[in-house]
Image: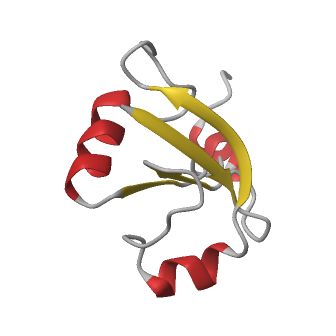
Amino acid sequence: MFCVIYRSPQRDQTYLYVEKKDDFSRVPEELLRGFGKPQLAMVLTLERTKKLANADIEKVKLALREQGYYLQLPPPVEDLLKIHLGKKDPV
């Protein structure tokens, strides 16, 4: 199974995975509008790939088979203030 990954020019760390290069026919139009003009990032063979950097490879394969695309969103931003306030200073 081949996978083509595109980077969003509008949303940092957001990637769109599809099965064929420049084939966005199964991607909802609304998603594409919010994503912006896809910029080619890389092409992978998922059978030879054991792990992806920020996505579960089995979820990617399943999404590609069932819906024709996979959208990778950026990891949640750490709330450093919340983390800091959650720590108790020893007295």
Would you place residue 34 above or below residue 67 in this image? below
Residue at 37% in and 29% down: 57
Indicate left or right for 50 with 17 as reference: left
- Any part of residue 82 in sight: no
- Residue 32: give x, y in percent of width and height: 56, 77
- Any part of residue 47 in sight: yes
Q: Compare residues 50 and 65 and report the one nearer the observer.
A: 65
Would you place residue 64 above or below residue 3 in this image? below
- Residue 83: give x, y in percent of width and height: 63, 42
Residue at 42% in and 73% down: 25
Count of numbered circles on the image: 0
- Residue 22: give x, y in percent of width and height: 59, 60
Q: Quadrant of the C terminus?
A: top right
Q: Quadrant of the N terminus?
A: top left
Indicate left or right for 70 with 11 as reference: left
- Residue 88: give x, y in percent of width and height: 61, 32
